[in-house]
Image (cartoon, rainbow, N blue to C red):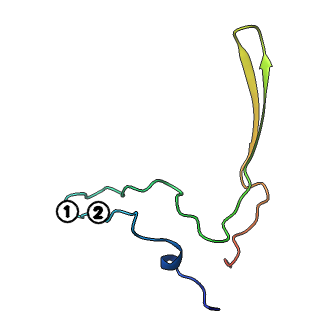
Amino acid sequence: MGQPHTANQWVSRAPFLQLNPVTQAGQFGNEGRNVVRGPGIEDADVSLFKYFHIDEKRRVQFRAECFNLLNHRISGCP
């Protein structure tokens, strides 16, 4: 139980399509980007925005965004 886990223990391979290298050469599969997140991967993304009305039909948006606000390293990585 004290051994580190492998990717096969965290992620099921069932939803992933195995491509045929002859008929599907150059394709990358059917799963979306960033769909697998293992243990210890946490981040805090923050977005603040404010609308300023110019007139009845127009408005301007001020937006500030911060990704991985706390800047934590992934636990278990060197």
Number of marks drawn = 2
Note whether 44 is above or below 49 in the view shown: below
Residues tagged 1 and 2 counted as in contact (Cβ below 8 A): no
Under mark 2, the amino acid is Leu
- Who's the residue at 32% across and 55% down the image? 27
- Who's the residue at 59% across and 69% down the image? 38
Image spot of residue 57 (x, y percent): 69, 9
Q: Is residue 14 left or right of residue 33?
A: left
Image spot of residue 37 (x, y percent): 58, 64
Give the Cα distance between marks 1 and 2.
Answer: 9 Å
The quadrant in which the N terminus is found is bottom right
Q: Is residue 16 left or right of residue 44?
A: left
Q: Which residue is mark 2?
A: 19
Q: Which residue is mark 1?
A: 22
Under mark 1, the amino acid is Val
Helix, strand or loop at label 1? It is loop
Few, some or many C-alpha atoms within 10 Å of disc 1 (few <14, some 14-19, many ≥20)?
few
